[in-house]
Amino acid sequence: MRHSCGQPLFHVKICGVTSPEDARQAAAAGADAVGFNFVPGSPRRVEIATAREAVAALPGGVLAVGVFAGAAAEEMVAVARTVGLTAIQLHGHLEADADAFDPPRDPAELAGLPVIRAVRPGSDGLTAARRWLASAAAAGRSPRMLIVDAGTAAGTAAGRLGGTGRLVDWDALAREPSLNLPTALAGGLSPENVAAAIQATGVVAVDTASGVESSPGHKDAGRMLAFVAAARRALGHQG
């Protein structure tokens, strides 16, 4: 997993932000993307009005990512326009027979916003992700970027699909052939382990939520600063 095609939309993302102050602090720490969770049942779900204030608090150049699972395109577009999102993350299940399934989306359906797709390893590695990506490519709907998050059970509720603190198997991910898209790593990343994760997997970007929190949805400024610094050092030393 040491090669990607194209430029990533971000290098360091702080996800599950629920307040304008945390958004400002994430950007001040050096994150170039901030994620806002609109998934029902998530402990990090943010209200529309609060998200709008938080996005307005971000400096120019910081990607404002809306995280959705199983939402209709019309809903995502409405939220994006109201809040001021600059990218959409599809975080639902990869298989059509699951609740909160996210089919491939054309950015034209989403008001031209770039699409980031979260994928999760299963017992057969990234086979399900590769099927989804092949379907997307065949329809001309490939996402701009991928995030590999920790695996979950087939029936996992939408609100429990991310931010669990569980780790991806870094060694197994490193053995996977390239997915041919810029790929970020999520799943239990923290200031203490992010450098090792980047070195082990060769990803071009990282994403964290629980690893920089004082409690679910409440970020710790010091941990965000330490995470971004450690991630950027490790990303800068990839060769």
Image (cartoon, grey):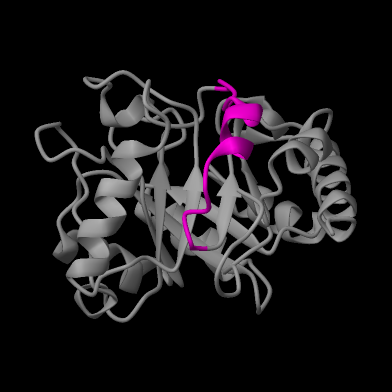
Say if 48 sits above or below 74 in the image: above
- Residue at 36 percent across and 54 percent down: it is 48
- Residue at 56 percent across and 74 percent down: it is 6
- Residue 123 image offset from top left, x and y in percent: 37, 20
109 or 224: nearer the viewer: 109
**Quick check: can you spot residue 78?**
no
Say if 98 sits above or below 34 in the image: above
Report the span colored magenta.
165-181
Say if 97 sits above or below 89 in the image: above
- Residue 221 image offset from top left, x and y in percent: 80, 41
- Residue at 25 percent across and 41 percent down: it is 94
Image quadrant occupied by the C terminus: bottom right
**Quick check: can you spot residue 47?**
yes
Quarter of the image where one finds residue 168: top right
Magenta-colored segment: predominant secondary structure: loop
- Residue 160 image offset from top left, x and y in percent: 37, 25
141 or 65: nearer the viewer: 141
Q: Is residue 139 left or right of residue 203?
A: left
Q: Is residue 152 left or right of residue 220?
A: left
